[in-house]
Image (cartoon, rainbow, N blue to C red):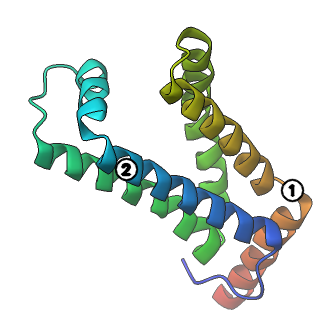
């Protein structure tokens, strides 16, 4: 992979900004409310003995996973990363909508807001400007390889 050239369209910049801000908000929420998150993780991940250190490691692991597609799309103009972001966001969207319908706590509201924001970000990745930019960078890489 080579680094993407040329100016990025505003949709790609907005995708990167929203994705990173959402990741930072999730990281701060996880670090701020560790006891609440440990209950959720214990329910979701089974019989793992959640210590404070493991919770912190999990929070930073999630943040790192969020940064990878941003780097792949914004930095390397990866079209496959765009598709993977859309595909892997679908279960999270469904979980957010389902949680908001079942639970009326502030956590469910946050999940619903995050789901709507995620849907917006995915839509930004499939705009004509983003598609043109990704194709242009692919053509430059193919021409350089010849």
**Residue at the limit of the structure toward the right, as seen here:** 128
> Residue 41: x, y in percent?
28, 28
Assign a secondary structure to mark 1.
Answer: loop
Residue 103, relative to residue 70: is it above or below?
above
Local secondary structure at mark 2: helix
Residue at 66% of width from left, 48% of height from top?
A: 83
Residue 38, percent across and down? 24, 31
Q: Horizontal and vertical percent for residue 55? A: 21, 43
Seen in the image, is 65 located left or right of residue 9?
left
Q: Which residue is mark 2?
A: 62
Quadrant location of the C terminus?
bottom right
In this view, the residue in front, 100 or 98, is 100
Q: Is the residue marked by circle 1 packed among few (<14), some (14-19), or many (20+) residues within 10 Å?
A: few
Distance of label 1 from label 2 (alpha carbons)? 27 Å
The residue wearing badge 1 is 127
Mark 1 / mark 2, whichever is N-terminal: 2
Q: Are marks 1 and 2 in contact (CB under 8 Å)?
A: no
Residue 133, above or below 114: below
Q: Is residue 29 above or below residue 40?
A: below
Task: Report which quarter residue 60 is drawn in.
Answer: bottom left
Q: Position of residue 31 (x, y in %)?
A: 30, 50
Left or right of residue 1: residue 48: left
Determine which quarter of the picture holds residue 133.
bottom right
The residue drawn where x is 78% and y is 85% is 7
């Amino acid at each position: 992979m080579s680094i993407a050239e040329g100016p990025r369209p505003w949709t790609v910049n907005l995708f990167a900004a929203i994705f990173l801000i959402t990741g930072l908000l999730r990281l701060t929420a996880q670090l701020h409310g560790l006891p609440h998150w440990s209950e959720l993780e214990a329910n979701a991940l089974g019989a793992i003995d959640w210590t404070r250190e493991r919770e912190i490691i999990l929070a930073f692991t999630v943040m790192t996973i969020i940064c990878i597609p941003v780097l792949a799309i914004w930095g390397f103009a990866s079209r496959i990363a765009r598709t993977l972001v859309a595909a892997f966001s679908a279960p999270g969207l469904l979980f957010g909508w389902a949680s908001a319908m079942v639970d009326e706590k502030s956590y469910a509201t946050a999940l619903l807001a995050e789901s709507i924001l995620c849907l917006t970000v995915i839509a930004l990745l499939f705009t004509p400007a983003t598609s043109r930019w990704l194709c242009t960078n692919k053509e430059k890489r193919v021409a350089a390889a010849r």
